[in-house]
Amino acid sequence: MMDLSADDITAILLSLKVASTAVAVSLPFGVVVAWLLARKRFWGRTVLDGVVHLPLILPPVVTGYALLLTFGRRGVLGGVLDQWFGLVFSFRWTGAALAAGIMGFPLMVRSIRMAIEGVDTKLETAASTLGASSVMVFFTVTLPLILPGIAAGTVLAFAKAMGEFGATITFVSNIPGETQTLSAAIYTYTQVPGGDAAALRLTLVSVALSMAALIASEVLSRRLTSRLAA
């Protein structure tokens, strides 16, 4: 059994908290964006698609710095959010959740978009001809059929959020108990003499959590697909 310290457990629990919050907040936006990209043709669609997937291409540090410029206390939006709503992202765990959510967003959107594109539009058209509104068609026809894609995208985004490092440490630093996630804790151990054993323990924990998330995604997708096919 691995001998985890109190700081290690705190980092693990914080990572779970950050990843869960990131996924929960970004999921509604992910579904809407995926639906727009899959079903609508509008000016700027290509730009939206590029912006959504930009975090996959940019160095994470660049994404983190952009978040700092935007949501820092003196940022474009950060000052307003702090003054009017009391929301502070920079150097807080909420900022870590924001960074993790943005980094995992492309994976979520891609999975959901592929699921929506796989739905037969004739089913949606048939529901519309029977008098159902666009909203009703989505919730009664489209949504049940894309649940496997939503499940897969959610778990992939969660796994990505659990392992996020570059954007997070740039935006919210590496503060023990506040922003020191699992990845940041591993990095910290690698920078101190004699920290290799602790870094290895947390690395094994990280691998185990990531594998569990991927396996859960596969199992959940298969179960939802089999239920829909039944």
Image (tube, helix red, strand yellow):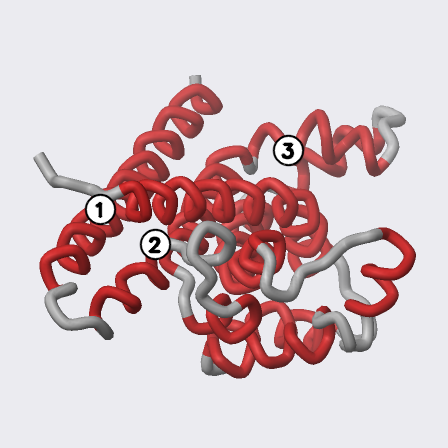
Q: Which mark is residue 205?
A: 1
Q: Nearer the viewer, residue 1 or 166?
A: 1
Name the secondary structure under disc 2.
Answer: helix
Q: Quadrant of the N terminus?
A: top left
Name the residue: 55% across, 66% down: 172
Q: Nearer the viewer, residue 65 or 216?
A: 65
Q: If you read the primary sequence from the N terminus, does the residue marked by circle 1 or circle 3 appear first?
A: 3
Viewer-side label of 1, 3? 1
Q: If you read the primary sequence from the N terminus, does the residue marked by circle 1 or circle 2 appear first?
A: 2
**Inter-mark Cα distance, 1 to 2:** 9 Å
Q: Quadrant of the C terminus?
A: top left
Query: Mark 2 = which residue?
Result: 182
Name the residue: 83% across, 38% down: 134
Judged left or right of residue 83, residue 120 is left
Q: Which mark is residue 158?
A: none
Name the secondary structure under disc 1.
Answer: helix
Q: Nearer the viewer, residue 211 or 92?
A: 92
Query: Image height check: is 16 above or below 35?
Result: above
At label 3, counting other C-alpha atoms closer than 10 Å, the crowd grade (few under 14, some 14-19, many 20 or more) is: some
Identity of the amino acid at label 1? Val
Query: Image height check: is 151 above or below 170?
Result: above
Judged left or right of residue 230, residue 43 is right
Name the secondary structure under disc 3.
Answer: helix
Q: Which mark is residue 143?
A: 3
Query: Image height check: is 4 above or below 74?
Result: above
Judged left or right of residue 147, residue 214 is left
